[in-house]
Amino acid sequence: MIFSNPLPVSRTICWIAALAAGLLVCAAHAQVVPSATGPGHALWAGGEYSNISASFPYQSGQRLWGIGAFADYHVTSHIGMEAEVRFLRFNSFYGETEDNYLAGPRYLVGRFGRLQPYAQCLAGIGKIQYPFAIGNGSYLALAPGAGANYRIARRWSLRGEYEYQFWLNSPNIANEPAHEITPKGFHVGLAFQLLR
């Protein structure tokens, strides 16, 4: 069987370099000390539990569980960036696993007491180890999602999120139907505010 080739290492390095450059540009400040500061410019980091509909095998209803880590940088009170990694290794279907390495913009709707809803659209790499050890693949993943943060203390926040991913040109297995892999599901996590 023929599988898609994993993304070349040079392309992966370019993606990581572009993400790092984007975050540095967002964080850059002028050399003059500001006369006042407003809300925003916060860095949060945390961990999460994920429960995802694997989407492979097609129409199987198989759910993968796993853990992940994320970092959110709020440029303003409404605009931010998120980077996340996720490792779905539990409740697998005959050895199937999925990993995600995603980053992208995030829009913070506003605050409603301690609740802050958001929407985001991440992009990056989705990796899969197919069941029965038939192979693996790496694909460009697009992941729109929405959720909310709930502030439980000054520097601590709970979060819940739903995400729907599109793995482009997947699974790309010869002589098989082209049912694109679309993992989707819920994530719950705990975040700590590192910088303010």
Image: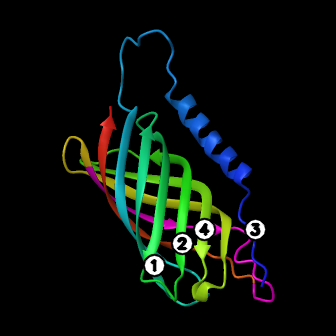
Q: Earlier in the sequence, mark 4 or mark 3?
A: 3
Q: Secondary structure at mark 1?
A: strand
Give the total number of marks visible in the rendering: 4
**Which residue matches tag 2?**
98
Q: Secondary structure at mark 2?
A: strand
Q: Amino acid at mark 1?
A: Leu
Q: Amino acid at mark 4?
A: Lys
- The answer to whether 128 appears left or right of 9 in the picture is left
Q: Amino acid at mark 2?
A: Glu
- Considering depth in this image, is 29 or 6 the residue closer to the camera? 6
Mark 2 vs mark 1, CA separation in Å: 8 Å
- The answer to whether 173 appears left or right of 28 in the picture is right
Task: Provide residue 66's location: percent of width, then percent of height.
Answer: 41, 71
Mark 1 vs mark 3, CA separation in Å: 24 Å
**Which numbered mark, 4 or 1, is in the foreground of this view?**
4
Q: Which residues are magenta?
A: 157-177
**Which residue matches tag 3?**
5
Residues marked 2 and 1 touching at CB (< 8 Å): yes
Residues marked 4 and 3 touching at CB (< 8 Å): no
| Residue under the point 35% across and 57% down | 47
Residues marked 1 and 3 touching at CB (< 8 Å): no
Tell me which corner region of the image, top left, top right, bottom left or bottom right, holds residue 175: bottom right
Q: Amino acid at mark 3?
A: Asn
